[in-house]
């Protein structure tokens, strides 16, 4: 008789909402999870872009120099308050922590720093976050950047939603533009991205088309160091 194999459906994913009253309890769980789940994905939600260069068309922002992009980002971050932070951890096999339960978990931290009634904000961004279910009244709550890495992979473009769809990764919990849901989708998409594009193994690590994965560490899209692209193809990809 042939051996019988059993296939169990994946555990459902639960987004753990973190507030002031349960902060220490959730930190304790995260510390436990971090002992065995070493890959981390994070996502933040801010009240949108409030400062842009007055003499630069919106469609040309992506062509600015890294120095200018950093300055714009810095001014916007310093002028606004964070709304949410999402956190997901997984082990070497892509499993989220389950703590021996019948669910897997990611975290969504809600910050009270942002006041929707008085703080500086981009109204379009706030309206979008409201439609995605963020309750602002109740809130009164090793690094790789896929956007950068996508430039070296044919056929990939757009934001997280488009990339995940292209790679066949489905959102399994929450809604887009919610920190907990986005951070989980980011982690799952990143793992799928590595599985597809960085399959070449060498003594120095994983590669894609000869590009060493380690070269992408700590480099953010739009904030690339000087001559960053020269190491890949001998010329800069940043538009003048």
Image: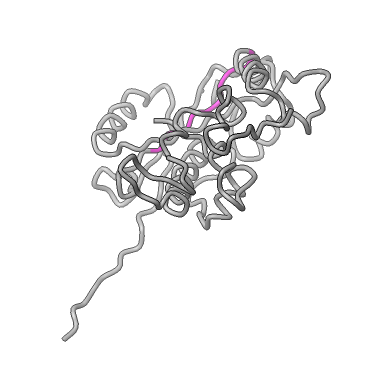
Residue found at the very far bottom of the displayed protein: 1
Q: Residue at x 28, y 29 (%)?
A: 31
Q: Residue at x 52, y 45 (%)?
A: 174
Does the stretch in magenta take in 81? yes
Q: Residue at x 58, y 49 (%)?
A: 163
Q: Quadrant of the C terminus?
A: top right
- Of the pair 121 and 224, the residue shown nearer to us: 224
157 left or right of 58 in image? left
Does the stretch in magenta take in 119? no
x and y percent of residue 55 in the render? Answer: 83, 19
Residue 105, image quadrant: top left
Tell me if residue 24 comes above or below residue 152 in the rendering.
above
Q: Quadrant of the N terminus?
A: bottom left
- Of the pair 71 and 42, the residue shown nearer to us: 71
Q: How many marks?
A: 0
x and y percent of residue 79 in the render? Answer: 64, 13
Tell me if residue 197 comes above or below residue 17 in the rendering.
below
Residue 207, image quadrant: top left
Q: Residue at x 66, y 22 (%)?
A: 69
Which coloring applies here? one colour
x and y percent of residue 47 in the render? Answer: 64, 25
72 left or right of 138 in image? right
- Which span is picked out in magenta? 79-88
Residue found at the very far front of the displayed protein: 234
x and y percent of residue 144 in the render? Answer: 46, 34
- Of the pair 234 and 12, the residue shown nearer to us: 234
């Amino acid at each position: 008789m042939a051996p019988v194999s059993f296939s169990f459906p994946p555990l459902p994913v639960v987004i753990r909402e973190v507030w002031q009253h349960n902060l220490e309890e959730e930190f304790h769980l995260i510390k436990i999870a971090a002992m065995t789940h070493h890959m981390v994905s994070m996502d933040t939600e801010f009240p949108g872009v409030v400062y842009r260069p007055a003499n630069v068309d919106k469609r040309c922002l992506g062509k600015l120099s890294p120095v200018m992009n950093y300055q714009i980002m810095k001014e916007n971050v310093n002028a606004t308050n964070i709304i949410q932070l999402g956190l997901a951890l997984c082990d070497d096999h892509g499993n989220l922590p389950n703590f021996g339960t019948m669910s897997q978990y990611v975290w969504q931290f809600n910050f009270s720093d942002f006041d929707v009634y008085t703080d500086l904000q981009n109204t379009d961004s706030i309206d979008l976050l409201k439609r995605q279910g963020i309750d602002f009244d109740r809130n009164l709550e090793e690094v790789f950047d896929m956007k950068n890495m996508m430039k070296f992979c044919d056929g990939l473009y757009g934001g997280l939603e488009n990339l995940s769809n292209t790679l066949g990764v489905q959102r399994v919990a929450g809604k887009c533009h919610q920190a907990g849901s986005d951070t989980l989708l980011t982690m799952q998409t990143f793992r799928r991205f590595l599985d597809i594009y960085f399959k070449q193994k060498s003594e120095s690590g994983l590669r894609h088309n000869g590009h060493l994965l380690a070269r992408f560490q700590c480099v953010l899209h739009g904030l690339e160091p000087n001559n960053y692209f020269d190491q890949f193809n001998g010329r800069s990809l940043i538009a003048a």
